[in-house]
Image: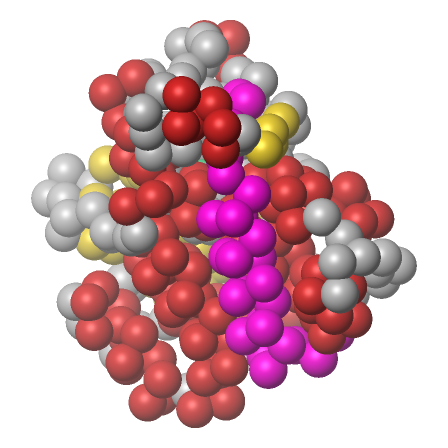
Amino acid sequence: MASETTSGSLLTVLETEHPEWRPLLAVIKEALREAERPQWARFVPALGHSARGGWPLLDGAVINVTPRLVGRWVRHILGIATAAWTEVDPLARRITAGGLDPLLLFESAVSQDVERFHEIALVDRDDHGLLRGLASLIAMPMLQNCRRAWAEQTPTDWAYGYCPICGGWPALAEMRGLAGARHLRCGCCGGDWRTEWLRCPFCGEGEHEKLGSLMSTDKLERETVEVCDRCRGYVKTMTTLSAIRPEHVVLQDLATLVLDVAALERGYRRPAAKGHEVAVSVVAESSRLRGLLGL
Ligand SMILES: [Zn+2]
Ligand SMILES: [Zn+2]
């Protein structure tokens, strides 16, 4: 089963087990590969605050980045994404034809402002959340690098259900190690924060009568779905010995799609909006300035 394999081979396993996902996996693979390119690390913004009071670290960030890096990445991923989602084609064409600034699209993706992303992409309906998923993948190289660069400054006592780094809702939860500590994980930036067992990450409900476990998929109960009857939210939970690699949370999320289906069939949902709004500005870095600074 996919969740028992090492993360490194998970992509291959998913490609083999689900040939129908290959176009989607190709997009995810590119986002993960892009996140490893050293150029992104250079553009991680300096932190302006320490995430106290529930403000994710990304909030207020000003990302000074070369338009060339962003333009190349946005054009590249949109090109690949059109094979997975034909709905993306008009957006890819606008970007290629110069009708839309890639920096603008990138800014809405990094701030995970779904409404703005839809507005910029000229999309009225996104019933299956395809564009929303694409926005996360466009943001992924930047956000994964922010998570790495800010590791020391990320609070360890984060008491909120959304990600302390990017403000997104958790993609899944881990019941980790022999002690079974509960950790929430962010699919976009790879964030990892410990949380209480009996607490809905979405609405904060803590009454056990309102919280339940929907099902287990095998005898060992490695994977379950925790549900909340107050907000009708759900979070997939998997038992792990050690932390899922940050870059592969997005793959584990996909690998456990059967749990999403089970939850949706019972009327539970992942919240549509992101956990906590973050204001992010993406600014075109002047190449002349870079030249003057000797960069
Ligand atoms: Zn995050
Ligand atoms: Zn809830």
What is the number of callouts on the image?
Answer: 0
Q: Is residue 265 above or below residue 190?
A: below
Residue in the image at 54% along x and 29% along y: 286
Magenta range: 61-87
Is 63 within the magenta?
yes
Q: Position of residue 23 (x, y in %)?
A: 51, 82
Outermost residue toward the right? 124
- Quarter of the image with the N terminus is bottom left
Residue in the image at 29% along x and 52% along y: 36
Classify residue 69 as left or right of residue 217.
right
Q: Position of residue 226 (x, y in %)?
A: 47, 50
Residue in the image at 31% along x and 74% along y: 11
Residue in the image at 15% along x and 48% along y: 242
* Quadrant observed for ligand 1 in the rendered image: top left
Q: Is residue 278 above or below residue 51?
A: below
- Most foreground residue, 251 or 71: 71
Classify residue 84 as left or right of residue 145.
right
Outermost residue toward the left? 178
Q: Position of residue 144 (x, y in %)?
A: 37, 43
Q: Is residue 192 above or below residue 222?
A: above
Is 261 within the magenta?
no
Q: Is residue 245 above or below residue 279?
A: below
Q: Position of residue 177 (x, y in %)?
A: 14, 44
Helix, strand or loop: magenta stretch = helix
Residue 227 visible (yes or no): no
